[in-house]
Structure formats: structure tokens, C-alpha cells
Image (cartoon, rainbow, N blue to C red):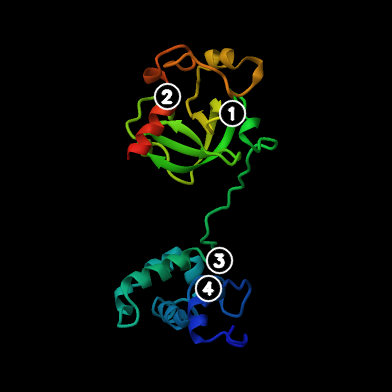
Amino acid sequence: MKKVPRLGEKAFEQAAGFLRVRGGENPLDSSAVHPERYQLVEKMATDVGCKVEELLNNETARKKIDLQRYVNDQVGLPTLKDIVAELAKPGRDPRKKFELFSFVEGVDKPADLQIGMKLPGIVTNVTAFGAFVDVGVHQDGLVHVSQLADHFIRDASEVVKVGQKVQVTVVEVDLKRNRIALSMKSKVDLDHRRSEAGDRGPQQNRPRPQGQNIGSKPAQNNDWFSHALQNAKKK
């Protein structure tokens, strides 16, 4: 690595521990142990009466290591514990397993949404009154706190967090006001919403009796989407 042009001592120090060389001359090359600590590990092996390869494959040998003997001004106990932990799992990739995620194909804009659709989504923001979810239509939908679970939830952060992958059901689409209401409940009552939407698909420019919303109930009792947005503006 030091022969690489413009790769200096500092870069080597910061990068060498991340490099894994399988089948290298030194068995520690396939581990996260930094080359600067190879000599320390070799001393550990000698002190317990074995070879470095045995420390990598023999838990009994590793348990014989007295870490306190190797604590000094350059190496502290936490670092020594990390070294021994790595000896137990040489070559392990420290990165989390990548999970492939994709939105539903063909659903690219709010107009493509239909009431009752079940879609995968990613939580983009969490507030006390609910969570905003990206379902791939360039307009986040709101899952009100009352729609986050089948049981009572006081605060959205109890069940969701930013970046979490979720499954949602579309319960309302208002293209005129750019609003998408979603639900994460296992069972969602959509009959009255479908009857209102009819064959025209998502709700758009549909006149409503003043002071009422879908289902002909008082807005303050049933339009939780508007109520949630009003609370957000106040905050």
C-alpha cells in the first residue's frame, strides 16, 4: 500500500485496517487488525504458547490472553478488546447486509395512486402526530398517528423512525391540495371512501358540503389529515 503514489503514512494508518487480504503471507492480513498491531498479536500468541493461526481458530487459546499485560501508553484496554474480538471473526465484513428496496413499478405520480393500494415506502419524517412516507410518487404521504398501528399510539416515534421501510395502504388522495393519506393498520375501512371516489379514481376537484368531509361527518371529527397539518403549521 505504501508503494501507491501519493499514499502517505497518515493515509496508510487510516486505511490499512479496512483492507482484507485473503491467503496473504500473514494470517492477520485477512482481519481488521492493523499492521501496526501485528507484533502485539504475535506476542500474545507466544505468551499463551501457540501460533497466530491458532488464536484465529481456537477460542480456548484466546481466553488465555491476559489483556491487562499489554496495556501501555499506546494501546488501551478498549483497543485490546477490539483486537481479540476481531481475532474471533477474521475476515468478517463489518458493513450491514444491504437490503434491496424498490417502489412499485408504474406508480410514479400521485395520479397513479388508487384508494386501497398497498405499497412499500420509506419513512422520511416523524412528528408527534404522524409519519410522512415516500411511496415513490414525488409527494410524501401522511400516516396519521391513529393509523400507525392496530393499537393505540400516543406518539409516532413509538413505532416508526426515519429511514424505516414500511408497508402502507392508500386511504385518500387529494390531487388539488397535494395530499396523500396513508395507513399502516392491518385492516383499513375503505368502503365509504371507495363509494365516494366511484369510478373516477383518486379524489380530485370533488365538491363537498361545506364543513363536511368524506362520509358526511363533521370535518373536525373525521378529517384527521387536515387536523394534523394544521397542528404542524402551529408548531
Residue at the spot of label 2? 150
Instruction: Answer with left or right where residue 153 lies relative to residue 115.
Output: left
Q: Earlier in the sequence, mark 1 or mark 3?
A: 3
> Residue 165 location in percent, x, y?
52, 41
How would you rate the neighbour count of disc 4 (Cα within 10 Å): few for under 14, some for 14-19, many for 20 or more?
some
Residues at marks 3 and 2, CA–CA distance in whole angstroms: 43 Å
Residues at marks 2 and 1, CA–CA distance in whole angstroms: 16 Å
Three-letter residue code for mark 2: Asp
Residue at the spot of label 3? 91
Q: What residue appears at the point 47 percent right and 68 percent down from the top-left corner?
A: 87
Residue closer to the observer: 73 or 81: 73
Q: Earlier in the sequence, mark 2 or mark 1?
A: 1
Determine the secondary structure under disc 2.
loop
Using the rendered image of the protein, determine whether residue 51 is visible from the camera's viewpoint: no
Q: Earlier in the sequence, mark 3 or mark 2?
A: 3
Residue closer to the observer: 15 or 30: 15
Residue closer to the observer: 33 or 103: 103
Residues at marks 4 and 2, CA–CA distance in whole angstroms: 54 Å
Q: Earlier in the sequence, mark 4 or mark 1?
A: 4
How would you rate the neighbour count of disc 3 (Cα within 10 Å): few for under 14, some for 14-19, many for 20 or more?
some
> Residue 218 location in percent, x, y?
39, 14
Using the rendered image of the protein, determine whether residue 60 is visible from the camera's viewpoint: yes
